[in-house]
Image: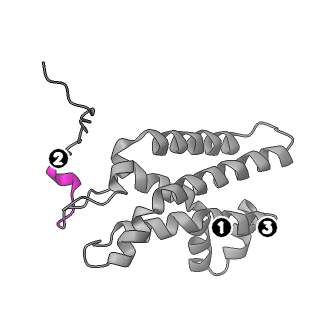
Amino acid sequence: MFYLPYKKQIMAIKIYPLQFYTQSGDLKPPTYFYCGLLFLARTWALLIISLVSRETGNKLLGIFYPDKIHFYLGLASGLIAILLFLLSGRDHDKHPFICKIWQKGYPFLLISICFDLGLQLYYLYLDKFQYSVEASIQLVLIIWLLLFCTRSKHLKTSFKRAER
């Protein structure tokens, strides 16, 4: 009997349906990824809404963010989400620099989610862990987003460059 001196590693490759690929052959992120980015960038969305409504913009920001430092921390936590959203629609074959940034985006996505989770826990601490529906919904959504991003093989694969 003949034995090989090394173990041959068989790598399972997941093949996705054709609709999940771009025209250049890159794997598109899942739809829930975009919903998660929108949730992470909710402060940016509120900023845009307040800029559009000129008269009530300051009142609107005052309702959601009475302390300005919380507003700036929300903008900071959503910045990575905005950048990933802008990079996700690019054709990575035509822009090699953008392709390199996109490939390194997954850890930054996890950092952004953990930063937002830390902010939510900090806000709960400031309120002495008093129950509120808004805080509960945001906490559940951010934990769900963290679990989704760490467990989704489709999302992890979409950040990797396909070998050609």
Q: Are marks 3 and 2 in contact (CB under 8 Å)?
A: no
Q: Residue furthest left?
A: 1
- Numbered disc 2: secondary structure: loop
Q: Quadrant of the C terminus?
A: bottom left
The answer to which of 27 and 62 lies nearer the viewer is 27
Give how far across and how far down residue 154 sits, in percent: 33, 46
Q: Which residue is mark 2?
A: 17
Give how far across and how far down residue 45 sits, in percent: 55, 67
Please tell me which of labels 3 and 2 falls first in the chain. Answer: 2
* Residue drawn at point x = 29 percent, y = 57 percent: 28
Q: Are marks 3 and 1 in contact (CB under 8 Å)?
A: no
Q: Which residue is mark 3?
A: 69
Report the Cα–Cα distance between label 3 and label 2: 45 Å
Q: Nearer the viewer, mark 3 or mark 1?
A: 1
Q: Is residue 22 magenta?
A: yes
Q: Is residue 29 above or below residue 89?
A: above
Query: Quadrant location of residue 64?
Result: bottom right
* Residue drawn at point x = 56 percent, y = 74 percent: 48
Of the residues shown, which amino acid type is indicated by label 3?
Answer: Ile
Q: Quadrant of the N terminus?
A: top left
Of the residues shown, which amino acid type is indicated by label 1?
Answer: Ala
Of the residues shown, which amino acid type is indicated by label 2?
Answer: Pro
Region rendered in magenta: 17-23
Q: Is residue 55 above or below residue 18?
A: below
Q: Is residue 147 left or right of residue 53?
A: left
Label disc, if present, on residue 76 of the rendered structure = 1
Look at the image and tell me whether residue 33 can be seen: yes
Q: Is residue 42 left or right of residue 95?
A: right
Query: Quadrant location of residue 143?
Result: top right
